[in-house]
Image (cartoon, grey):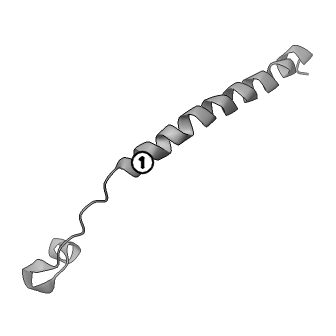
Amino acid sequence: MIPAAAHSSAPDTMAQASAALQEVVPRLVALVRSIPDPPTPSRSEHGRSAMSRLT
């Protein structure tokens, strides 16, 4: 059986985790959105795509 004391800290832990996520998530979203899109592979070399040149 789990002692009652183990349960009393669970709400505090969840509140701390929730507060940490509310602080971190917006920063993470801003960071991901700031990453530029990668350039798309050109279809030069006789119209073949980059992937077809690998095979």
Q: Is residue 48 left or right of residue 6?
A: left
Q: Nearer the viewer, residue 13 or 33?
A: 33
Under circle 1, the secondary element is: helix
Question: At x 41% / y 51%, what residue is drawn?
Answer: 33
Amino acid identity at mark 1: Val
Residue sitting farthest toward the left: 45
Q: Is residue 15 left or right of residue 31?
A: right
The residue wearing badge 1 is 32
**Quarter holding residue 24:** top right
Query: Where is the C terminus found, in terms of image quarters?
Result: bottom left
Asked whether the viewer can see residue 29, the reply is: yes
Crowdedness of circle 1 by 10 Å Cα count: few (<14), some, many (20+)?
A: few
Q: Is residue 4 left or right of residue 43?
A: right
Q: Position of residue 29 (x, y in %)?
A: 49, 46
Question: At x 16% / y 79%, what residue is drawn?
Answer: 43
Query: Where is the N terminus found, in terms of image quarters?
Result: top right
Q: Position of residue 47 (x, y in %)?
A: 14, 85
